Image (cartoon, grey):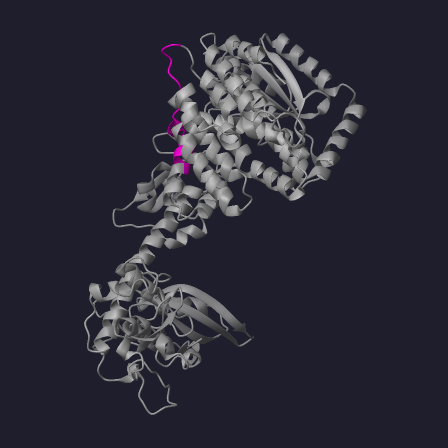
Amino acid sequence: MMRQFELVERVKSYDPAADEDAINRAYVFAMKMHGSQKRASGDPYFSHPIEVAGILTRYRLDSASIITALLHDTIEDTPATLDDLEKLFGPEIARLVDGVTKLSRIELQSDHAKQAENLRKLVIAMSEDIRVLLVKLADRVHNMRTLSYIANPDKRRRIALETMEIYAPLAERIGMQEIKMELEDLAFAELHGDARGSIIARLNFLREQGGDLIGRILEELRKTFEEAGVKATVSGREKTPYSIWLKMQRKNVGFEQLSDIMAFRVVVDSMEDCYRALGVIHSKYPMVPNRFKDYISTPKPNGYRSLHTGVFGPERHRIEVQIRTDEMHEVSELGVAAHWKYKAGGGRMTDGRQYRWLRELLDILEHASNPDEFLEHTKLEMFQDQVFCFTPKGDLISLPSGATPVDFAYAVHSDVGDTCVGAKINGRIMPLRSRLHNGDQVEVITSKAQTPNPTWERFVVSGKARARIRRFVRTQQRAQYLDLGRAILVRAFRQESYDLTERALEGVIKIFKAPTADDLMAMVGEGTVTAKDVVSSVYPELKNAQKTDNVVHLGRNKAKPAHEREKRGNAVPIRGLIPGMAVHFAGCCHPLPGDRIVGIVTTGKGVTVHTIDCENLEQYAETPERWLDISWDETEGKAHIGRIDLVVNNEPGTLSTVTTVIAKNMGNITNLKITNRTTEFFEMLIDIEVRDVKHLTNVIAALRATPLINSVDRARN
């Protein structure tokens, strides 16, 4: 265990202005507070905060971070309070310790929702001060080093999985490559111990077979640079077991098929020397195709800069070479800590919001409906490879692998994503679902009239885009459920000769556990509460009264269905509603304006619209309270989908004739499916975008007049 003076000397070695007195006081205070507490390993508990502080000194962090590391468990595990820390060490230390403590308290729970809440609090805390994340990462490193002492295997696996999915990607995001690799390897040992052991055994075997292979390659590379007159420091290492295993998984290959398991680092004096060294390497050794990456001209989002290339190097071994300057190397090893300014007048880089990826996580947090959804989107945002694209002005945008122009638009700005209508990729207009590749230049086309399309969620891959689209859908659904519920209640109240008033609803909202009258109306629109129940609750004397207006008998009783009555003044009009939200058009009968229609209230989904003669209505005969009298809004001019069933001659040009006839009659084919094929005939279903029933009838009539078409009817299935 590191002694007090050793810790102080470490900090003073890189920060002569460090607050030695405060560090000493924090050391003594933490030791006193933790007292005789023990860890699972049997070591004194106080050894943990000292080790965490020691890890942070490796990255030359300021006194406040070191003190926070020493005190980070005192509030949670000792009688010390936040007020005590503020009085003894000041508000800055108290705030940092509080940020880490909140996370630790939640982390003790194994519940998935608690993990989500933990991550939510971490993002908020580190956005205010990035040092919270640095202390948390060091805390996690030491906990992972001692993970084997935890007796419960399920708990060990949960901690390892959380480390792999959240903390290792976070370390990568801030450029803490060394911490990232250690966390991954420690988690890998717990999650896939057998695989790790097998890879280590294979590496040991290769080492024995090849002798000092790395040393021989190093010596030849050094001679190569010396002969070319390039001053360079060369070092080499084997790749970690986890990175080897990951490559085996991604490429779906065995260990024997991996040849680039060695990486060599070349450190030179200047950026110009980086490219000179690259030229030396490529002129001496054959380059492996598609293995060159220039992170100097296009740095990674975490500030990482380096040249990467794969070559068939000395002794014909395939190796990876990384070329960088001393400054670039420091950033690659220390990440955000390399930028830490502790000198007088330099200021401290503590505001986490300066990091683009963190701003995006905060944006996801703002738009996610609950912690679980935030956890899902954040993992999506962090735990993927990246693709680098450019704006028309040359700005670099990094996105998850598989990203589309919609993801790109949201990465530029939320408003750009919301109003995106199209995109040009490398000057060509391309579909919004196109996948982007490294180096693509993307121009987003926007329109003030555009709103997020719910179907975008099917192909976007970034957490920010998905969270924003889901929020819009929720907002739209809420508004539509509210409008639909209000219309349904107005009709229900009128049938009983009453007017719908907000005061009447406020008197019964507690019965339905609705916060407001609007919430109650939205519940009615969503189908979780029936209008009949609301009316009966407002006017209890109606509970036992006979309701005939809503009863549908489908020909088995004497009363006529409400939808066949001449008077339709109480019908709820359907207007401008987005399919898939509050109102759904049934796929069995494909209702169109001009059809007599009826609505079926479906719990949690709103209303499904059927034609009055749809055969599927029979199954709802015993639940009349779910039937809703609805009508088309005559002012609506949007397109609807009609389905037709065709039998056509199996002759050349038949399909072309069908599509031409439909197009000439202003129909737009949205889907076509061949359902049966013989030597003489084709049977097919075609979905056509039309205005109304009359429009579809005209299309059908034109098709029937075509000689190559045997028969055509409106589909009812």
Q: Position of residue 323 (x, y in %)?
A: 56, 19
| In the depicted structure, whether residue 141 falls above or below residue 411 | above
Residue 201, by quadrant, is top right
Front residue of this view, candidates 539 and 519: 539
Q: Position of residue 447 (x, y in %)?
A: 27, 46
Q: Position of residue 608 (x, y in %)?
A: 37, 70
Front residue of this view, candidates 181 and 397: 181
| In the depicted structure, whether residue 635 falls above or below residue 409 | below
Q: Position of residue 167 (x, y in %)?
A: 53, 34
For residue 325, side relative to residue 516 (left or right): right
| In the depicted structure, whether residue 290 falls above or below residue 296 | below
Q: Which residues are magenta?
A: 344-361
For residue 487, side relative to residue 6 (left or right): left
Instruction: Please indicate, yes or no, whether residue 174 appears anywhere in the rendered image.
Output: no
Residue 570, by quadrant, is bottom left
Residue 634, by quadrant, is bottom left
For residue 263, side relative to residue 682 (left or right): right
Residue 347: in magenta span: yes
Question: Could you tell me which residue is drawn at 76 percent across and 32 percent down?
Answer: 202
Q: Going by the picture, which residue comes out furthest to the right?
A: 209
Question: Could you tell me which residue is drawn at 64 percent across and 39 percent down?
Answer: 156
Residue 128: in magenta span: no
The quarter of the image holding the N terminus is: top right
| In the depicted structure, whether residue 392 falls above or below residue 553 | above
The quarter of the image holding the C terminus is: bottom left
For residue 205, side relative to residue 272 (left or right): right
Question: Could you tell me which residue is drawn at 30 percent across and 64 percent down?
Answer: 639
Instruction: Please indicate, yes or no, whether residue 18 appears anywhere in the rendered image.
Output: yes
Front residue of this view, candidates 31 and 96: 31
